[in-house]
Image (spheres, grey):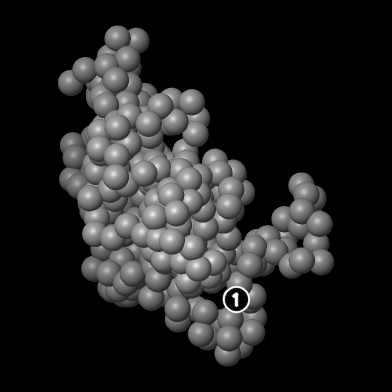
Amino acid sequence: MITIIAKRGIIALTTIFVGVLLTFVLFNIAPGDPCHTWAMQLVERQGIPYELAYKRAVEMWGYDPRKPIYQRFIEYIKGLLHGDLGYSRTYQMSTNRIIAKTLPWTVFVVSISLLLSFSLGIILGALIAWRRKGVLDSVVTGFASIMSATPAYLIALILLAFLGVRLKWFPVRGAYDITFTPGFNIPFILNCLYHGALPILSYVLEAVGGWTLAMKGSTISVLGEDYITAARARGLKERRIAISYAGRNSILPLVTSLAISLGAMFGGAVLVETVFSYPGIGRFFALAVGQRDFGAIQGLFFVTITAMIVANFLADLLYAKLDPRIRLGK
Protein backbone atom coordinates (compact mmCIF):
# COMPACT_ATOMS: atom_id res chain seq x y z
CA MET A 1 0.00 0.00 0.00
CA ILE A 2 2.77 2.43 0.99
CA THR A 3 4.70 1.54 -2.16
CA ILE A 4 1.69 2.24 -4.35
CA ILE A 5 1.08 5.60 -2.65
CA ALA A 6 4.76 6.45 -3.13
CA LYS A 7 4.48 5.62 -6.84
CA ARG A 8 1.40 7.82 -7.16
CA GLY A 9 3.26 10.56 -5.33
CA ILE A 10 6.19 10.34 -7.75
CA ILE A 11 3.79 10.51 -10.69
CA ALA A 12 2.15 13.60 -9.16
CA LEU A 13 5.51 15.31 -8.62
CA THR A 14 6.56 14.47 -12.18
CA THR A 15 3.32 15.92 -13.51
CA ILE A 16 3.88 19.11 -11.51
CA PHE A 17 7.39 19.38 -12.95
CA VAL A 18 6.11 18.93 -16.52
CA GLY A 19 3.41 21.55 -15.89
CA VAL A 20 5.98 24.00 -14.53
CA LEU A 21 8.26 23.34 -17.50
CA LEU A 22 5.50 23.89 -20.08
CA THR A 23 4.31 27.05 -18.32
CA PHE A 24 7.83 28.46 -18.18
CA VAL A 25 8.56 27.70 -21.84
CA LEU A 26 5.25 29.09 -23.10
CA PHE A 27 5.65 32.38 -21.26
CA ASN A 28 9.30 32.78 -22.21
CA ILE A 29 8.78 32.14 -25.93
CA ALA A 30 5.70 34.36 -26.11
CA PRO A 31 6.08 37.48 -28.29
CA GLY A 32 7.10 40.66 -26.56
CA ASP A 33 9.73 41.61 -24.02
CA PRO A 34 8.52 43.14 -20.74
CA CYS A 35 12.04 44.46 -20.09
CA HIS A 36 11.90 46.36 -23.39
CA THR A 37 8.53 47.88 -22.46
CA TRP A 38 9.81 48.90 -19.04
CA ALA A 39 13.03 50.28 -20.55
CA MET A 40 11.09 52.46 -23.01
CA GLN A 41 9.09 53.89 -20.10
CA LEU A 42 12.33 54.71 -18.29
CA VAL A 43 13.69 56.39 -21.44
CA GLU A 44 10.57 58.56 -21.72
CA ARG A 45 10.40 59.44 -18.02
CA GLN A 46 14.09 59.92 -17.21
CA GLY A 47 15.61 60.63 -20.64
CA ILE A 48 18.40 58.09 -20.16
CA PRO A 49 19.97 56.03 -22.97
CA TYR A 50 18.11 52.88 -23.96
CA GLU A 51 20.94 50.48 -23.05
CA LEU A 52 21.16 51.90 -19.53
CA ALA A 53 17.37 51.81 -19.21
CA TYR A 54 17.28 48.19 -20.40
CA LYS A 55 19.96 47.23 -17.88
CA ARG A 56 17.95 48.81 -15.08
CA ALA A 57 14.80 47.06 -16.30
CA VAL A 58 16.58 43.70 -16.22
CA GLU A 59 17.67 44.37 -12.65
CA MET A 60 14.14 45.39 -11.66
CA TRP A 61 12.45 42.39 -13.30
CA GLY A 62 15.00 39.98 -11.88
CA TYR A 63 15.75 38.08 -15.10
CA ASP A 64 17.50 38.73 -18.39
CA PRO A 65 15.59 37.69 -21.54
CA ARG A 66 18.88 37.61 -23.43
CA LYS A 67 20.11 34.66 -21.36
CA PRO A 68 19.61 31.16 -22.84
CA ILE A 69 16.21 29.80 -21.83
CA TYR A 70 17.68 26.74 -20.12
CA GLN A 71 19.74 28.98 -17.80
CA ARG A 72 16.66 30.97 -16.88
CA PHE A 73 14.73 27.73 -16.23
CA ILE A 74 17.47 26.37 -13.96
CA GLU A 75 17.43 29.61 -11.99
CA TYR A 76 13.64 29.43 -11.73
CA ILE A 77 13.70 25.81 -10.49
CA LYS A 78 16.35 26.69 -7.91
CA GLY A 79 14.07 29.44 -6.65
CA LEU A 80 11.09 27.03 -6.41
CA LEU A 81 13.17 24.50 -4.48
CA HIS A 82 13.98 27.26 -1.99
CA GLY A 83 10.32 28.23 -1.73
CA ASP A 84 10.69 31.36 -3.88
CA LEU A 85 7.77 31.66 -6.32
CA GLY A 86 9.11 34.84 -7.93
CA TYR A 87 8.86 38.58 -7.54
CA SER A 88 6.07 40.81 -8.81
CA ARG A 89 7.37 44.06 -10.26
CA THR A 90 3.83 45.36 -10.68
CA TYR A 91 3.06 45.16 -6.94
CA GLN A 92 6.68 45.50 -5.77
CA MET A 93 6.49 42.44 -3.54
CA SER A 94 7.26 38.72 -3.65
CA THR A 95 4.74 36.38 -5.29
CA ASN A 96 4.75 34.38 -2.04
CA ARG A 97 3.38 37.41 -0.21
CA ILE A 98 0.71 38.01 -2.87
CA ILE A 99 -0.42 34.39 -2.62
CA ALA A 100 -0.42 34.53 1.18
CA LYS A 101 -2.70 37.59 1.05
CA THR A 102 -5.04 36.45 -1.73
CA LEU A 103 -5.28 32.65 -1.44
CA PRO A 104 -7.32 32.66 1.81
CA TRP A 105 -10.04 34.75 0.15
CA THR A 106 -10.24 32.42 -2.84
CA VAL A 107 -10.30 29.35 -0.58
CA PHE A 108 -13.03 31.02 1.51
CA VAL A 109 -15.32 31.59 -1.47
CA VAL A 110 -14.46 28.43 -3.42
CA SER A 111 -14.83 26.02 -0.50
CA ILE A 112 -18.22 27.40 0.55
CA SER A 113 -19.44 27.42 -3.07
CA LEU A 114 -18.30 23.87 -3.72
CA LEU A 115 -19.84 22.57 -0.50
CA LEU A 116 -23.18 24.22 -1.23
CA SER A 117 -23.34 23.27 -4.91
CA PHE A 118 -22.26 19.67 -4.25
CA SER A 119 -24.74 19.16 -1.39
CA LEU A 120 -27.63 20.73 -3.30
CA GLY A 121 -26.69 18.88 -6.49
CA ILE A 122 -26.61 15.40 -4.97
CA ILE A 123 -29.94 16.00 -3.17
CA LEU A 124 -31.68 17.25 -6.31
CA GLY A 125 -30.06 14.62 -8.52
CA ALA A 126 -31.02 11.73 -6.26
CA LEU A 127 -34.56 13.11 -5.86
CA ILE A 128 -35.32 13.48 -9.57
CA ALA A 129 -33.73 10.08 -10.31
CA TRP A 130 -35.90 8.43 -7.68
CA ARG A 131 -39.03 10.16 -9.03
CA ARG A 132 -38.37 10.07 -12.73
CA LYS A 133 -40.71 11.28 -15.47
CA GLY A 134 -42.52 13.70 -13.20
CA VAL A 135 -42.93 17.48 -13.29
CA LEU A 136 -40.09 17.95 -10.82
CA ASP A 137 -37.78 15.87 -13.01
CA SER A 138 -38.50 17.99 -16.09
CA VAL A 139 -38.15 21.31 -14.28
CA VAL A 140 -34.95 20.46 -12.36
CA THR A 141 -33.31 18.73 -15.34
CA GLY A 142 -34.05 21.72 -17.58
CA PHE A 143 -32.72 24.17 -15.00
CA ALA A 144 -29.62 22.06 -14.39
CA SER A 145 -28.91 21.79 -18.12
CA ILE A 146 -29.12 25.56 -18.58
CA MET A 147 -26.96 26.33 -15.54
CA SER A 148 -24.28 23.79 -16.40
CA ALA A 149 -23.99 25.30 -19.90
CA THR A 150 -23.77 28.89 -18.65
CA PRO A 151 -20.28 30.25 -17.82
CA ALA A 152 -19.76 31.40 -14.24
CA TYR A 153 -18.61 34.87 -15.36
CA LEU A 154 -21.88 35.42 -17.28
CA ILE A 155 -23.90 34.47 -14.21
CA ALA A 156 -21.67 36.80 -12.19
CA LEU A 157 -22.38 39.72 -14.55
CA ILE A 158 -26.14 39.12 -14.32
CA LEU A 159 -26.06 38.95 -10.53
CA LEU A 160 -23.87 42.05 -10.40
CA ALA A 161 -26.27 44.01 -12.60
CA PHE A 162 -29.50 43.03 -10.84
CA LEU A 163 -28.72 42.14 -7.21
CA GLY A 164 -25.74 44.44 -6.82
CA VAL A 165 -26.29 47.55 -8.96
CA ARG A 166 -30.04 47.67 -9.57
CA LEU A 167 -31.47 46.33 -6.29
CA LYS A 168 -28.40 47.14 -4.16
CA TRP A 169 -28.97 44.08 -1.99
CA PHE A 170 -25.29 43.11 -1.90
CA PRO A 171 -21.95 44.95 -2.20
CA VAL A 172 -20.37 44.76 -5.65
CA ARG A 173 -16.68 44.95 -4.72
CA GLY A 174 -14.23 44.12 -1.95
CA ALA A 175 -14.07 41.35 0.63
CA TYR A 176 -15.29 43.32 3.68
CA ASP A 177 -16.15 46.81 4.85
CA ILE A 178 -13.15 48.94 5.79
CA THR A 179 -14.93 49.84 9.05
CA PHE A 180 -14.35 46.27 10.27
CA THR A 181 -11.07 45.16 11.82
CA PRO A 182 -9.99 41.81 10.32
CA GLY A 183 -10.07 39.02 12.87
CA PHE A 184 -11.62 35.70 13.77
CA ASN A 185 -14.86 37.06 15.21
CA ILE A 186 -18.53 36.72 14.32
CA PRO A 187 -19.17 40.31 13.04
CA PHE A 188 -16.17 40.20 10.69
CA ILE A 189 -17.01 36.70 9.38
CA LEU A 190 -20.63 37.71 8.73
CA ASN A 191 -19.45 40.81 6.88
CA CYS A 192 -17.12 38.66 4.76
CA LEU A 193 -20.03 36.34 3.94
CA TYR A 194 -22.14 39.35 3.00
CA HIS A 195 -19.45 40.66 0.62
CA GLY A 196 -18.78 37.19 -0.75
CA ALA A 197 -22.45 36.36 -1.30
CA LEU A 198 -22.54 37.24 -5.03
CA PRO A 199 -19.29 35.43 -5.95
CA ILE A 200 -20.45 32.39 -3.97
CA LEU A 201 -23.88 32.48 -5.62
CA SER A 202 -22.25 32.73 -9.05
CA TYR A 203 -20.19 29.60 -8.44
CA VAL A 204 -23.12 27.71 -6.90
CA LEU A 205 -25.53 28.43 -9.77
CA GLU A 206 -22.90 27.47 -12.34
CA ALA A 207 -21.80 24.24 -10.60
CA VAL A 208 -25.04 22.90 -9.16
CA GLY A 209 -26.37 21.93 -12.60
CA GLY A 210 -23.42 19.67 -13.31
CA TRP A 211 -23.62 17.97 -9.91
CA THR A 212 -27.38 17.46 -10.30
CA LEU A 213 -27.10 15.82 -13.72
CA ALA A 214 -24.12 13.70 -12.64
CA MET A 215 -25.95 12.47 -9.52
CA LYS A 216 -29.09 11.77 -11.53
CA GLY A 217 -27.19 9.61 -14.02
CA SER A 218 -25.29 7.78 -11.28
CA THR A 219 -28.46 7.11 -9.27
CA ILE A 220 -30.38 5.81 -12.29
CA SER A 221 -27.49 3.44 -13.00
CA VAL A 222 -27.49 2.17 -9.39
CA LEU A 223 -31.27 1.70 -9.33
CA GLY A 224 -30.87 -0.95 -12.02
CA GLU A 225 -28.53 -3.07 -9.89
CA ASP A 226 -29.60 -6.45 -8.50
CA TYR A 227 -29.05 -5.48 -4.85
CA ILE A 228 -31.71 -2.77 -5.17
CA THR A 229 -34.19 -5.36 -6.45
CA ALA A 230 -33.15 -7.70 -3.64
CA ALA A 231 -33.64 -4.98 -1.04
CA ARG A 232 -37.17 -4.35 -2.30
CA ALA A 233 -37.89 -8.06 -2.31
CA ARG A 234 -36.87 -8.20 1.36
CA GLY A 235 -39.52 -5.61 2.11
CA LEU A 236 -37.22 -2.81 3.16
CA LYS A 237 -38.71 0.67 3.36
CA GLU A 238 -38.30 2.87 0.30
CA ARG A 239 -36.63 5.57 2.40
CA ARG A 240 -33.95 3.17 3.59
CA ILE A 241 -33.37 1.85 0.06
CA ALA A 242 -33.09 5.40 -1.29
CA ILE A 243 -30.58 6.56 1.32
CA SER A 244 -28.58 3.49 2.41
CA TYR A 245 -28.50 1.58 -0.86
CA ALA A 246 -29.08 3.88 -3.83
CA GLY A 247 -27.80 7.20 -2.47
CA ARG A 248 -24.72 5.84 -0.73
CA ASN A 249 -23.48 3.99 -3.81
CA SER A 250 -24.49 6.69 -6.28
CA ILE A 251 -22.38 9.33 -4.60
CA LEU A 252 -19.12 7.35 -4.81
CA PRO A 253 -18.29 8.22 -8.46
CA LEU A 254 -18.80 11.90 -7.64
CA VAL A 255 -16.16 11.92 -4.90
CA THR A 256 -13.33 12.00 -7.43
CA SER A 257 -15.01 14.84 -9.30
CA LEU A 258 -15.46 16.75 -6.04
CA ALA A 259 -11.73 16.77 -5.28
CA ILE A 260 -10.83 17.64 -8.87
CA SER A 261 -13.40 20.46 -8.93
CA LEU A 262 -11.83 22.01 -5.85
CA GLY A 263 -8.56 22.35 -7.74
CA ALA A 264 -10.22 23.44 -10.98
CA MET A 265 -12.18 26.24 -9.34
CA PHE A 266 -8.92 28.01 -8.47
CA GLY A 267 -8.30 28.41 -12.19
CA GLY A 268 -11.88 29.44 -12.83
CA ALA A 269 -11.77 32.11 -10.15
CA VAL A 270 -10.08 34.60 -12.49
CA LEU A 271 -13.15 35.96 -14.26
CA VAL A 272 -15.60 35.86 -11.35
CA GLU A 273 -13.21 37.59 -8.96
CA THR A 274 -12.43 40.19 -11.62
CA VAL A 275 -16.14 40.93 -12.13
CA PHE A 276 -16.66 41.59 -8.41
CA SER A 277 -13.19 43.09 -7.76
CA TYR A 278 -12.78 40.40 -5.13
CA PRO A 279 -9.21 40.33 -3.73
CA GLY A 280 -8.62 36.65 -4.43
CA ILE A 281 -5.85 34.91 -6.31
CA GLY A 282 -7.84 34.96 -9.57
CA ARG A 283 -8.15 38.74 -9.71
CA PHE A 284 -4.45 39.28 -9.09
CA PHE A 285 -3.67 36.67 -11.70
CA ALA A 286 -5.73 38.59 -14.28
CA LEU A 287 -4.00 41.87 -13.36
CA ALA A 288 -0.57 40.21 -13.62
CA VAL A 289 -1.39 38.89 -17.11
CA GLY A 290 -2.46 42.37 -18.21
CA GLN A 291 0.86 43.80 -17.00
CA ARG A 292 2.93 40.89 -18.39
CA ASP A 293 4.25 40.40 -14.88
CA PHE A 294 6.01 37.06 -15.45
CA GLY A 295 7.23 36.83 -11.85
CA ALA A 296 3.67 36.85 -10.52
CA ILE A 297 2.16 34.86 -13.41
CA GLN A 298 4.52 31.90 -13.07
CA GLY A 299 4.06 31.75 -9.30
CA LEU A 300 0.27 31.88 -9.54
CA PHE A 301 0.29 29.28 -12.31
CA PHE A 302 2.43 27.04 -10.11
CA VAL A 303 -0.13 27.25 -7.29
CA THR A 304 -3.03 26.47 -9.66
CA ILE A 305 -1.25 23.52 -11.29
CA THR A 306 -0.21 22.12 -7.92
CA ALA A 307 -3.75 22.46 -6.55
CA MET A 308 -5.16 20.51 -9.51
CA ILE A 309 -2.62 17.68 -9.31
CA VAL A 310 -2.76 17.35 -5.52
CA ALA A 311 -6.57 17.26 -5.77
CA ASN A 312 -6.35 14.38 -8.26
CA PHE A 313 -3.87 12.54 -6.02
CA LEU A 314 -6.10 12.91 -2.96
CA ALA A 315 -9.15 11.88 -5.00
CA ASP A 316 -7.47 8.58 -5.91
CA LEU A 317 -6.66 7.85 -2.28
CA LEU A 318 -10.09 8.89 -1.02
CA TYR A 319 -12.00 6.91 -3.62
CA ALA A 320 -10.02 3.74 -2.86
CA LYS A 321 -10.75 4.27 0.85
CA LEU A 322 -14.48 4.79 0.38
CA ASP A 323 -15.01 1.94 -2.08
CA PRO A 324 -13.26 -1.31 -1.03
CA ARG A 325 -13.78 -2.67 -4.54
CA ILE A 326 -11.26 -0.14 -5.87
CA ARG A 327 -7.57 -0.82 -5.42
CA LEU A 328 -4.83 1.77 -6.03
CA GLY A 329 -2.68 -0.72 -7.83
CA LYS A 330 -5.34 -1.53 -10.43
Quadrant location of the C terminus in the rendered image? top left
Q: Residue at x 38, y 34 (%)?
A: 76
Q: Residue at x 24, y 59 (%)?
A: 31
Classify residue 250 as left or right of residue 45: left
Classify residue 300 as left or right of residue 133: right
Q: Position of residue 144 (x, y in %)?
A: 32, 68
Quadrant location of the N terminus in the rendered image? top left
Q: Position of residue 204 (x, y in %)?
A: 45, 63
Residue on which disc 1 sits? 172
Residue ranking furthest to the front: 49
| Camera-side residue of 132 and 188 | 188
Residue 284 appears in the rendering: yes
Q: Quadrant of residue 209?
A: bottom left
Q: Residue at x 58, y 52 (%)?
A: 92
| Camera-side residue of 288 and 4 | 288
Above or below residue 164? Residue 325 is above
Q: Quadrant of residue 299?
A: top left
Q: Residue at x 29, y 39 (%)?
A: 67
Crowd band around label 1 with a 10 angstrom C-alpha radius: few (<14), some (14–19), many (20+): many
| Camera-side residue of 19 and 91 | 91
Q: Position of residue 289 (x, y in %)?
A: 39, 60
Element carrying mark 1: loop
Classify residue 242 as left or right of residue 278: left
Looking at the rendered structure, the kind of residue marked 1 is Val
